[in-house]
Image: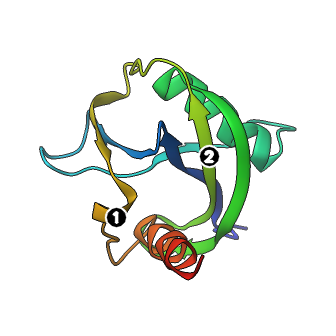
Amino acid sequence: MLWDNPVPVVAALVECDGRVVLARNVAWPEKQFGLITGYLERDETPEVAVVREVAEELGLAAQSVKLIGLYNFALKNQLLIAYHVQASGRLVLNEELAEFKLIEPAKLKAWEYGTGLAVRDWLAKQSAQ
């Protein structure tokens, strides 16, 4: 019997030195950037997974991790567990990522699907503060 349950995926809106890190996966078209994402490993909490993914994919150390929200990503049958991760260190991309860009939060724009919904909610919280 196949249940086809959604797969949990962590997403990190990484802020480093006051700027948000967006990255392009090697499999994505040029100019398509997004948040850092990854799958949970066995017996791993989402908080531990997001810290691990930020370290593995960007070479950064998480200083704080705060939940932004949970988002259904039906296109890929995933449940996105999105966090705001304050991080520090020197950005070094792993083999999964082709490039990155750093964006001032005031210039960050959300997109209408997947992790873009977490960006939208994070930006709304920032403007409310």
- Residue to which mark 1 is pinned: 106
Q: 62 above or below 32?
A: above
Amino acid type of the residue that numbered disc 1 sits on in the rendered structure:
Ala
Q: At 67% from the left edge and 33% from the top edge, which residue is drawn? A: 62
Residues packed near mark 2 inside 10 Å, few (<14), some (14 to 19) or many (20 plus): many
Q: Position of residue 90 (x, y in %)?
A: 46, 17
Label tally: 2
Counting other residues with Cα less than 10 Å from the Cα at mark 1, is it few (<14), some (14-19), or many (20 or more)? few
Residue depicted at 70% across the width and 70% down the height: 3
Residue farthest to the front?
Answer: 129
How far across and how far down the image is residue 7, in percent?
64, 58
- Up-down: is 36 above or below 127? above
- In the rendered image, the quadrant that contains the C terminus is bottom right
The residue sitting at 63% across, 68% down in the picture is: 4
- Looking at the image, residue 123 lies above or below residue 85: below
Residue under the point 12% across and 44% down:
30
Measured in 3D between alpha carbons, the distance from the residue under mark 1 to the one under mark 2, in whole angstroms, is 17 Å
Color style of the picture: rainbow
Q: Amino acid at mark 2?
A: Val
Q: Which mark is residue 12?
A: none
Viewer-proximal residue, 63 or 26? 63
Which residue appears farthest toward the right when viewing the image? 43
Q: Is residue 35 left or right of residue 82?
A: left
Q: Element under label 2?
A: strand
Residue 28, x across and y down, in percent: 23, 44
**Which image quarter is the N terminus in?**
bottom right
Does residue 5 appear in the picture of this structure? no
Q: Which residue is mark 2?
A: 85
Whole-percent x, y for residue 75 in the image: 41, 71
Q: Of the residues under marks 1 and 2, which one precedes in the sequence?
A: 2
- Tell me the SS state at disc 1: helix
Judged by depth in the image, the label closer to the viewer, 1 or 2, is 1
